Amino acid sequence: MEGFDLDWRLRGLLLHCEAVLAHRSGSVRSALAKCEEALSLVQPFGDRPATASMTLHAGLLRKTMGEQDAETRVRKAQGIFREIGRTDGAQLCDRILAG
């Protein structure tokens, strides 16, 4: 993406797509790095749906890596999903936290 003059939201979404692809290919650390970078781009500008999705993804990646703050991330995503009325996202977080 270097060299492209993309707006912050598009950059964040593209990075998150790269994170998903890295995750699917088994590169969990790379996926987490890309997910965190994407989150750092969209979060300051108040894109709540993208922030919730990326926070949840980061939580899942951290859970896969056995990191202690994984549950905190999922709970944060759950709160955002509830704030914006995305019950599907909040319910997904409920299932992740339950099991």
Image (tube, rainbow, N blue to C red):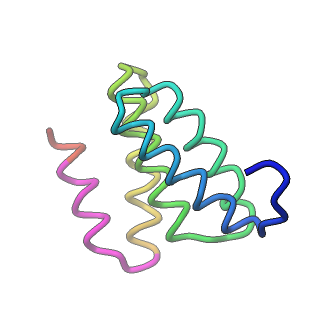
Direction front: furthest residue: 3
Magenta stretch? 84-95
Q: Residue at x 43, y 27 (%)?
A: 27
At horizontal 45% and vertical 77% (from top left) the residue drawn is 84
Q: Position of residue 18 (x, y in %)?
A: 52, 47
Q: Residue furthest top?
A: 66
Where residue 78 appears, as percent x and y from the top left, is: 38, 58
How many marks can you see?
Answer: 0
- Residue 95's x, y, as percent? 17, 51
Left or right: residue 23 compared with residue 55: left
- Front one among 68 and 13: 13
Snapshot quadrant of residue 71: top left
Q: Image height check: is 37 above or below 84?
A: above
**Which residue is depicted at the point 55% across and 44% down?**
35
Query: In which quadrant of the rendered image does the C terminus lie?
Result: top left
Decide: is 95 above or below 5. Answer: above
Percent of width and height locating residue 39: 62, 51
Q: Is residue 92 magenta?
A: yes
The quadrant in which residue 25 appears is: top left
35 left or right, relative to 2: left
The vertical placement of 61 against 73, above or below, is above
Q: Image quadrant of residue 41? A: bottom right
Q: Nearer the viewer, residue 32 or 93?
A: 32
82 within the magenta span:
no
**Overall secondary structure of the magenta stretch?**
helix
